[in-house]
Amino acid sequence: MPKKPGTNPKGEFAFFNVLYEDGSQRSNRRVPSELLDGLDKDEPAREFIMQQDHEIAEKSGRAPLKITSISRVGAKKK
């Protein structure tokens, strides 16, 4: 059954591209927007993504990769 237009909440998540030290990249990592409302800008996103990576690594039995950089999807480069 199709959904009514406007029923999906917009802006619930911010999306980030993550670059790791081995040169690999993960695109469109979701971070709750409520974490990004403060003065720290996108720094809480790094912590959130690192926590996710740690949980994934624990389940897979591999060491988590070190994050080189993160960038918000659609943001202009400085």
Image (cartoon, rainbow, N blue to C red):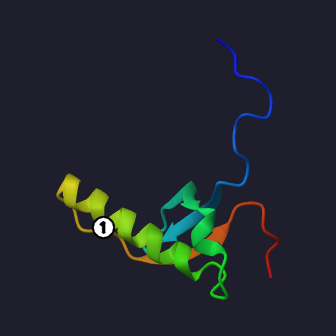
Q: Where residue 29 sits in the image (x, y, percent)?
A: 54, 57
Q: Where residue 6 sits in the image (x, y, percent)?
A: 79, 34
Badge 1 amino acid: His
Q: Quadrant of the N terminus?
A: top right
The answer to whether residue 32 is above or below residue 7 is below
Name the quadrant containing residue 42. Answer: bottom right
- How many marks the image carries: the answer is 1
Residue under label 1, please give it.
Answer: 54
Kindly identify the residue that appears in the image at 53 percent across and 78 percent down.
44
Name the quadrant containing residue 47. Answer: bottom left
* Residue at far top of view: 1
Q: Where residue 60 sits in the image (x, y, percent)?
A: 22, 53
The answer to whether residue 68 is above or below residue 40 is above
Query: From this viewpoint, is residue 22 visible?
Result: no
Kindly identify the residue that appears in the image at 28 percent across and 61 percent down.
55
Q: Secondary structure at mark 1?
A: helix
* Residue at far left of view: 61
Q: In the displayed structure, does residue 54 sit left or right of residue 14?
A: left
Q: Quadrant of the C terminus?
A: bottom right
